[in-house]
Amino acid sequence: MNRNKSHPMDPANLRRQAEQKLPANEANPRKSLSSEETQNLLHELRVHQIELEMQNEELRRAQEELEAVRARYFDLYDLAPVGYIVLSEKGLILEANLRAATLFGMPRAGLLKSALTRWIVSEDQDDYYRHRNQLFKTREPQIFELRLVKKDGAPLWARIEATAAQAADGAPLCHAVLIDISERKQAERAIKNSWEYSDSIVNTIRESLLVLGADFSVRSANRSYYKTFKVKPEETDRRSIFDLGNREWDIPLLRQQLEELLSNNIAFDDFEVEREFPGIGLRTMLLNARKMPGESSLTNMILITIEDITERRKLEKALQESRTRFEYKSFHDGLTGLYNRDYFSEQMTHLGKDLGRSPLVSIIIIDIDGLKIVNDTLGHKAGDDLLISAAKIISESFRQVDIIARIGGDEFCIILQGVDYKAALAKKNKLSKSISLYNNDKLAVPLNMSVGVATSQNVNGETIYDIYQRADENMYEYKLIQAGSQKSKVIDMLLSALSERDFVAQGHAERLSTMAQLIADKIHLSDDQTKNLILLAKVHDMGKVGIPDKILFKPRKLSEEEFEKMKKHSQIGYNLASRSKQLFHISDLVRHHHEFWDGNGYTEGLKGDQIPLECRIFSIMDAFDAMTNTRPYRKGISKKRAIKELQRCSGTQFEPRLVEEFVEFVEFAH
């Protein structure tokens, strides 16, 4: 990403653009700004400054996550059972793990920046240069053996597995695995020098060894083999290597290479096989084979060294999986699985560079409508589920080659390369149809989107950000036109869900509405107060749409924790009502319909006349209806007992004057 290039939305760039648009006059090269224009410009600059600060904060968090992943990576890196170094093209050691430092018998810092040739014996340096040049020339892996010298001068035989790589700046690198084969070399020399001492020598080394006859039967094995693979001599000796345990050893290529070794003395290294061993399971092994003199001058035998690399392969797999997960998380949104804003910004930069060569680009911006209402009422889990559904529908409406990213909490963006405006509109229409089909299922939460489309105009000076800006403006124009209806759809859905749940109270809202009209007539409420009281009776529990069913439908009394969650329905109902044109004027009544006369109610603990009159009346009606009708967790009581309970709570939960009025109303009505 070109960080030196000024972003079109940068405040400094905006200030320069604003200044360039001001007409000049003779007295002053730039026209002076009026106070209002100055304030507007400063406000605009402050808004973009805040946006940049938010982006910097997101970048800081991403860097912290990167450092954490890198720390885990290097922990695994240092736990590797083999030496690992990174070389520059000139052979300088740029990086080394702890095992590599241990092999050389010195601190890791002593290795860094030194030339590898410093530690290679002079006789082997030509071979090293040959393999190194071949690696950087062909980029094919090189495997070879070298004699090294430790810090204290002690010799070290090492097997080198070198692969080509590339630094971030494009410089060639070499990644090399160093395996200490000193013991194996000592064993091979010992076997060649004296067969009589072979048994005692091979049993002193930790690497597993097998000696095969010309018929590939096992003539001997060292203690390490029996110990490592948990087998007994009688299960191995004089048996063909292809008959050890299961038949997985009988690999045609292995048989062919063993035959070529005996007939043509063609040794082989690092033949990788897997075998299931009783007691220790599946093991991965590297086989290295050499021909050696037999017990007589007329016979030859095969020495096979076996390296158990199971743990190394597991570590390599873990490292690869860790790197894959890190790369995926770096460019994907954790909730929806789509590309994230970082990846989107990177692609915008790339497209911006290539816009002159491939000018045909369309951008579609999508905003999920009503997400905040869903979060405030049904909770963030419902909001997340809505975003996941939206992401799935969006993904199915576009091609795999299209760049689909979640660039904000409720905002998505699609980059369509090589797609003209007409085709982009067709994609938008396809998306709209998919949304309609989704909503036809009458799910709990409908999905509504505001969509904006823009296509490159192939004019001089046009940037990818110009296209993005036009799509964004087109989306907001649509949102402004549809804002009321879209919000209303979400609220209507939630109220519909509430009415379906009213069977829990078995007509509670309907009874209260009838009672509200009668009591309003008795105490001579104004027309507005009467209408508000009746409407409150119908929708007072609308916030319960955001309460879990396991609490609403619980057949027993709620626990203290559950009751605290239930109390939130007043605030949730307020959030809903305040967003509805039809209910906005009674939103405060919905919030306060559980306040107590003595101030011990909720949501805000209002007291006495601070509580709206409609709420004071409603609380008495609501309590009376609740007591005299059966609920899931208890049976209803008689009206006489309910009146006594109202009188008992007069002055604490209820206003005394209104309790008297209500009792007269109930006794007269019945």
Image (cartoon, rainbow, N blue to C red):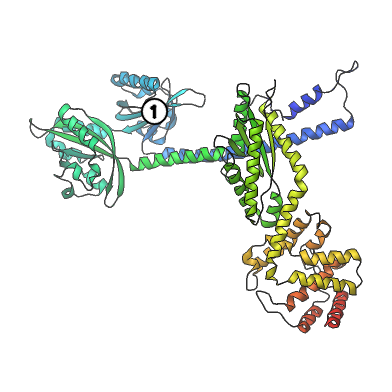
The percent position of residue 592, horizontal first and vertical second, equals 80, 63
Q: Give the percent coordinates (x, y) of residue 658.
A: 87, 74
Q: Residue at x 67, y 23 (%)?
A: 458
Residue, far top:
26
Residue 46 to residue 499: above or below: above
Kindly identify the residue that appears in the image at 36 percent across and 39 percent down.
81
Which quadrant holds residue 625?
bottom right
Q: Quadrant of the N terminus?
A: top right
Q: Is residue 163 visible?
A: yes
In which quadrant of the rendered view does residue 329 lie? top right
Q: Is residue 2 above or below residue 558?
A: above
Answer with the quarter of the image where residue 398 lies: top right
**Does residue 213 appear left or right of residue 479 in this picture?**
left
Q: Which residue is painted at 89% across and 31% down in the image?
A: 35
Q: Residues within 10 Å of mark 1 (few under 14, many from 20)?
A: some
SS at mark 1? strand
Residue type at the position of mark 1: Thr
Q: Quadrant of the C terminus?
A: bottom right
Give 403 or 72, whichever is nearer the viewer.
403
Looking at the image, residue 129 lies above or below residue 426: above
Residue 315 lies, in percent from the top left, at 40, 41
Can the viewer see residue 544? no
Mark 1 — residue? 163
Find residue 640 and report its horizontal and vertical position in percent: 78, 84
Answer left or right for 121 relative to 617: left
Judge by depth and name the residue closer to the eye, 204 or 375.
375
Q: Is residue 57 left or right of residue 317?
A: right
